[in-house]
Image: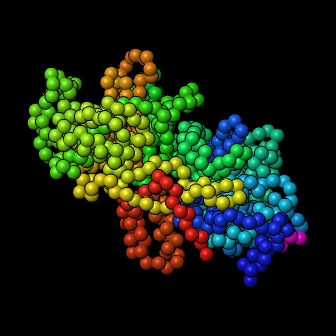
Amino acid sequence: MTRALALATALLLTSLSHAPTAQAADPVHFWDLQPRSLRLLVASSQVMVTRTKTGWDAYCRCPVVLAPSEIPEVMKNAIVAVEDKRYFDHNGVDVVSLLAVLKGGLTRGGSTIPMQLLKNLVFHDLRGGNVLTRLERKGAEVWYAGLFNEAVGKEELLAAYLNQIEFGGRDIVGLYRASRHYFRKEPKDLTLYEAALLAGMVKAPARLNPLREKTRERAHERALIVLKLMAEQGRISDKERRQAEKAGIRPGLLPEFKIQPQAFTEWVVETWGDKYLQPGETVRFFVTLNPRVQHIAEQQLSRLIKDGAVPSQYDAGAVMMTPNGRVQAMVGSVNWSQRQFNNAVKARVQAGSTAKLPLLIAACEAGKTPESKVVDQPISGTWPANGELGYRGQTTLKEAIASSRNAAAVRLTQEIGTDTVAEVSRRIGIDPGPAADASFVLGSYSSNVMAMTAAYTVVANGGYRITPAGVLAVVDGRGQVRADFLTPMRTRVIPEKCVEPTQEVLREAVEHGTGRAAQMKQWAAYGKTGTSTGNADAWFVGWSEQRVFGVWMGRRRAETGHAVAGAGAPAAYFGRVATAVNEWAKRQQRLEEQRLASARSKRGLDANQIVDWLSSLPQAMMLPDILSPQEKPLREKRT
């Protein structure tokens, strides 16, 4: 009965707005996507892109996504009390509130949390002030809120709402960034009063800003209203309300959370903008960027620079991606505010010894193992040179690659066949050029950080070719999905028998070879260093815990001074970032395991089912849903 009444109300609101228009084809909309896809999208950052007559206007809505277990109960209770008091009792639409809207007009509101989230994430073209536009949006919200609520789930949807609402401007999206901005603390440390103050701000962040003198008093008055509502609804006691009012704000000492997502945003616009936007349009790109990982990458680079490990003559570029090629972090330069050039994508530089990766694979395909003997001697005079290493004569393939012996690499390439090794290189996504000679395995050709990181991802994910991805879905301002990059696809390009041997050699490079600076105490690391002639380019590309991180540091043109090698700052940078990201991911997994175990126990599920589900996660990561270079057909609608 309740659902029927909600649907009837939606039909009434929609019919009041305008008659339906004919569609050329049956379009797929945001709410038609599968529940798994919807849960991913509502927990994603978005790049908002407007195509103007002269170019592009783009920015990143980059919330730090909190899992349900990371959001304090005081914050959940506060936001539900003031925004949707029957949230846990309705199926997406609060019929009581909707009837009040029909009786008192659109100014009465009536939007539930699922409806508001739909408005904030999808309907940016329907926020106009005229009545017909507002009726159309309200009708769509009512019609689809139930499906949305069912697909995402109550706890996840409430977390998504708190992650995606704006608390004042483009840079203060979501609870985490709001907590850091207004109170200089983590959300888990919010007091009851602070939670009430933030919940009260949602109505009008600019008019209820507690930091501005003109709006401070109004913000605190609103917080008192929220506390009163919480008490009236039985979410807190009167004693707790009085104690909260007395305690007030207790600011912390943490700095505001800031990142520089401009390089990633620029890459998204330049790669996908032309294809999906017409002049005058604003389209939302749901993207793969993870602000926490991005922050770690920027923070660790800044520390290395402060420590003097990265000389002022060097710039940098870095990319972190998951096994399926989704880019989670991108560092475009040492300081984007000073130099707006995206080294991660646009810098064409020599690859150094990171180019030896296809040789490893080709050697395995030719029947060699990590323990196979190779000859480390010059071919002509002192070429190829091994630098300070000297020549070892006969050694193993593992030792030759781990120690970065150039002479052994070139000799082995000639033995296997230059064309054969070059074909493997192209197969994993690195083009050495049309007329490669055996020295190409020393990195004499030009590449970029994105391409090299993607190539190493092929080995990390078990041998599957990937296309670097920054976009999950493209959704216009009325909810239509213009492109969906969520469809799984896998293409094997490395024989299964060659994956483990290749990984073994890259592990040796970190344990006992040139990549020792990338070692971590708790986790295994795999990778390869690279340094070009004259230390113009220094590399480390590798992975740990299935997160692949490619690092390049290069001397600016015509600069002189202290030199950097791949075994130095790039490897150390990898180690620092990988350690910090692994620690964060471990904490996240532990919190989610506790939440899921608690939720399942309440539903009476067997604990063994939880264990089985959690044990399947690592395998799921090892078998990634590789993205196709071309868009896949949009999936069928949910019914």
Q: Please, is residue 518 above or below residue 85 in the view?
A: above
For residue 88, side relative to residue 207 (left or right): left
The quadrant in which the N terminus is found is bottom right
Display colour scheme: rainbow
Which percent across, then down, holds residue 258? 59, 39
Q: How many marks?
A: 0
The residues colored magenta run 99-103
**Which residue reaches farthest left?**
394
Q: Quadrant of the C terminus?
A: bottom right
Residue lying farthest to the bottom in this orientation: 1
Identified at 51% across, 60% down, the residue is: 632
Tell me if residue 178 is in the magenta stretch.
no
* Residue 417 shown left or right of residue 38 in the figure: left
Residue at the spot 59% in from the left edge and 48% down from the top edge? 275
Would residue 75 be visible to someone looking at this image? Answer: no
Q: Is residue 127 above or below residue 452?
A: below
Q: Position of residue 252 (x, y in %)?
A: 61, 43
Q: Where does residue 89 sit, x and y in percent of width and height?
A: 69, 74
**Residue in the picture at 43% in, 17% down:** 559
| Residue farthest toward the right in the current orientation of the protein | 104
Between 60 and 533, the residue placed more toward the observer is 533
Question: Could you tell me if residue 58 is visible in this image?
Answer: yes
Q: Nearer the viewer, residue 306 or 316?
A: 316
Q: Tell me which corner region of the image, top left, top right, bottom left or bottom right, holds residue 4.
A: bottom right
- Give the residue at x 69% y 68%: 145
Q: Check if residue 101 falls in the magenta segment.
A: yes
Q: Position of residue 379 (x, y in %)?
A: 15, 28
